[in-house]
Amino acid sequence: MMRQAGRYLPEYREVREKIGFFELCANAELAAEVSLQPFRRFGTDAVIMFSDILVPLRAMGMEVEMAEGGPRLPHPIASMADVGKLHGFDAAKSTPYVLEVVQRLREAAGDQAAVLTFAGAPWTLACYMIEGGGSKSFSTIKAMLAHDPQTLEALLQLLAETIGEFLASQVEVGAQALQLFDTWAGELSPEDYRRWALPFERRVFQIARRKNAPGILYINGCAGLLEDMATSGADVLSIDWRIELTEARRRVPAFALQGNLDPAALLAPPRVVKRRTRTTIDSLGGQAHILNLGHGILPTTPVECAETFVQTARTWHGIAVPEMEALP
Amino acid sequence: MMRQAGRYLPEYREVREKIGFFELCANAELAAEVSLQPFRRFGTDAVIMFSDILVPLRAMGMEVEMAEGGPRLPHPIASMADVGKLHGFDAAKSTPYVLEVVQRLREAAGDQAAVLTFAGAPWTLACYMIEGGGSKSFSTIKAMLAHDPQTLEALLQLLAETIGEFLASQVEVGAQALQLFDTWAGELSPEDYRRWALPFERRVFQIARRKNAPGILYINGCAGLLEDMATSGADVLSIDWRIELTEARRRVPAFALQGNLDPAALLAPPRVVKRRTRTTIDSLGGQAHILNLGHGILPTTPVECAETFVQTARTWHGIAVPEMEALP
C-alpha cells in the first residue's frame, strides 16, 4: 500500500504525537519503527520505508515545511539564479538517516519481506518547487515551461541526477525495489509528458537501477500515458484506479502491473472491501501483478479495512504474492 | 471555450465588480451581456450561456455560497431525510432568468453563432452536495456509495430528472446544443462510473434532447472511460488534454470529438499558442471536431492568447468550423 505507514494506523499517530513530520523522517530509529508497523500488523509482502518525496529537496538546499493543508515551500524556484542556489548531495553525508533506515529495515525484514524505497520523479518534485506547494492547475510550472524552458530544463536535469544517485545509494545498502512517483505527470498532455517528464524518469532509472532492483513507475492519472510510460526504463507500471487493469494489461502486455484499487474503496464495509479486492486480483488472474491501491491510502481508512485488503490478497485462491525479487 | 465568459476578460471583471456571482447568474440582462462579450470580442462560433452548474441546486432547495476558494454548501446531504427536503422545480417559475438569457442570446446571435447551454451531471452535482464543496479525495461521497447506496441513488435520480427537465426547457426556448459536465466522474473507477454516473447521464440526455439539439458530454480525466461514455446518449464527447485526440478518435470512431488543448497552454507566448492550436486541429484533420480547451480557461490567461486560439482556429487551413446544428 502506498503510504503504508501512515495516519490511518493508531500506532503511527501515537509516534507522530511526539515528533514533527520531517523530524520523524530524519530519525532513523523511529522512521524504521513506523515503517515496520504495517508489516508487523498485517504481514505485508513489502516493508516500505517511511519517508517523504520532499526529503531530498531539503538536502538540495530547498526550504520545505509541512503545514496543515500539505507541504509549503516558502521560496519557490522562479529563475535560473534560483536553480543555481541548489546543489546535489551525497546521501551518506547529508541524509545518513535514510541509509540507516534502509539498513535497519533490511535486517528486520530478513527473508519475510522485500524492502522498498521510493522517490519523487523530477517533474513532480519540480511542481512542488515551482508552485511552492500543491496546486490545482499547475499554472506556474506550465507557464515556466512555455516562457523559460531553459530554467525548467536545468532544474529537471539537476533533479534527475540527484534523485538517481539518492536512490542508487539506498539500493547499495539494501533496498530491493524502488518506486518512482511521478504523481503529477498525469496533469500533462502526452506531448508535454514526453518532453518534460519521461526523459527525466528515464535518467533516474538509468542511474538508480543497481543489483537488478526492479524499478516501479507510478503516475496518478496514467490512462493516457501507458505506452509512453513503458519506455521509461521501469520494470513495473503502477496504475491508478481510473482505468481497468485488464485494459492496461492489453495495452502494455510486457509489463508487470501494480495497483489499482481506489483508495476510497477501503472506506467501504469490510465485506465490500473483500469483494472488490478479489475482483481486482481476478482481473489479472494473479499474473505479473502486485496488488496495491491506485494512490495513497486515505488517513480516514478504518484499520480493519486495510487489514481485509491485505488478508484477502494473501488468501484468495491461495495465490502466493510473488516476491519482489522475482519481478518482472 | 469552457468558461468562455470569465475572469480572464477585463470586460467581465468590470461587470463582476458591481455584482455578486450568483446575482449575476440571476440577472438576465447582465448574464446575457457577459455571455456575449467573448462572441463580440473574438467572433466565436458559439455563444455559451453564462451561468453555473450550481444554479439549479439553489432552485432545488440547497444552500450554495460562492467563497474565495470555490463553492461552499454549508448543509451537505448526509441522509435520506436530507434528500427528502430537496425538490424538483419548473424553470419558468423558479429560474425564469435562465430562460430569458437563452432567449436573449438566441436573438443576439442570429445566424452568426449557435447558442449553447450546459448543466452539471448528477454525479458531479452530488459530489458538491455531499462533500459540501470541492474535494481532493471525494471520500465522503465514496463512503456514502458504499455505506448508504439508497440515499445516493435517490439523490442521483432526483438530480437526473430535475437537470433533464431544466435543460429541456432551455432547448425549448432556443438553446441549440447542451453540454453536460460530469467533471468529477473522472475520479471514479470504470466500474463505479458505470454504476454511479453513466446511468444518470443517460437519463439526463433522454429527457433533455429535444429538437435534435446535440448533447455534449464532458468528463475531466476521461481517458479510461471513453468506450463507456460512448453509451451515454451523447452525440459529442468532450475530451480533456490527458489523452491524444487521435487515440480518442481511434477508440470511439463514431463520435464527434470536442477539445482538447491544455488550458495552461494558453499561458504560453502567442506564437506557441498558435503552434499548439494548429497541431490540435491537424491531429483530427478538421473532421468531426469542435476545437476547445480540455477544461475551463484559467483566470490568469492573457486575453491575446485566448484571441490567438480562436483566430488560429478560424483561419488555419481555411477550415470552416462546422455549425453546431450540423453535428454529428
Image: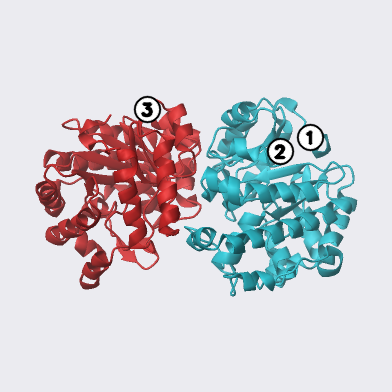
Chain colours: A cyan, B red
Residue linked to disc 1: A327
Other residues around mark 3 within 10 Å, as few (<14) / some (14–19) / many (≥20): some
Mark 1 secondary-structure assignment: loop
| Residue A98 screen position, x and y as percent | 81, 62
Give neighbour class at mark 1: few <14, some 14-19, many 20+ (Cα, 10 Å): some
The answer to whether marks 2 and 1 sit on the same chain is: yes
Q: Seen in the image, is A210 located left or right of residue A304?
A: right
Residue A243: give x, y in percent of width and height.
54, 36
The residue sitting at 72% across, 64% down in the picture is A55
Q: Disc 3 marks which residue?
A: B231
Q: Is residue A291 something one can see in this rendering?
A: yes
Lateral position of residue B199 relative to residue B43, left or right: right
Q: Quadrant of residue B42?
A: bottom left
Q: Quadrant of the C terminus of chain B?
A: top left
Report the residue marked by disc 2.
A236
Q: Kindly identify the amino acid type of the residue bearing the numbered disc 3.
A: Thr
Q: Are marks 2 and 1 in contact (CB under 8 Å)?
A: yes
* Sequence-wise first label, 2 or 1: 2
Instruction: Give the residue at x 68% y 71%.
Output: A84
Give percent across and percent down for residue B261. 42, 47
